[in-house]
Image: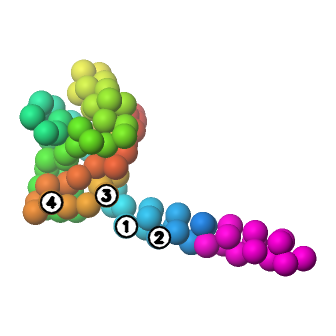
Amino acid sequence: MRRITLLTLFFIALASVSVTVYAALTVAHGKPIAVYADPSDVVVELDVTGSCGSKFFHIQRTNQNFKELTAAALTAISSGKSLHLFVASCAADRNILSHGAVIQ
């Protein structure tokens, strides 16, 4: 019985941490205007302002999904589709991305 209780508490704690992590994300939805290759980031310029106060959204090269998110940005700009971007944090007015998607 004690083993089941500890396991239940572990899953409750894990679920509460997951909710906390994603609660900090903000979302920007817009059309890409330009994609810039920078020495430390790939920067996507959207036609809307993000939660940090600029139209520039940074994909950091240290991000685990750097290649996939960059591919999504290039796909969106080349096909004229919109991006749905999740901003994880701000660095001054820079929107630092977590993940995103190409949408209609």
Spot occupied by residue 84 in the image (x, y as percentages of width and height): 35, 44
Snapshot quadrant of residue 8: bottom right
| Image point (19%, 47%), residue name | 57
Judged left or right of residue 35, residue 15 is right
| Quadrant in which the C terminus appears | top left
Disc 3 designates what residue?
A: 88
Residue type for callout 1: Ala
The image position of residue 103, as x and y in percent, is 39, 36
Label 4 belongs to which residue?
91
- Ranked by sequence position, the earlier of labels 4 and 1 is 1
Q: Is residue 79 above or below residue 62?
A: above
Distance from Cα at disc 2 to Cα at disc 3:
12 Å
Q: Residue furthest front?
A: 3
First to last magenta residue range: 1-13
Counting from the top left corner in percent of width and height, residue 31 is at 24, 38
Secondary-structure class at tag 4:
strand
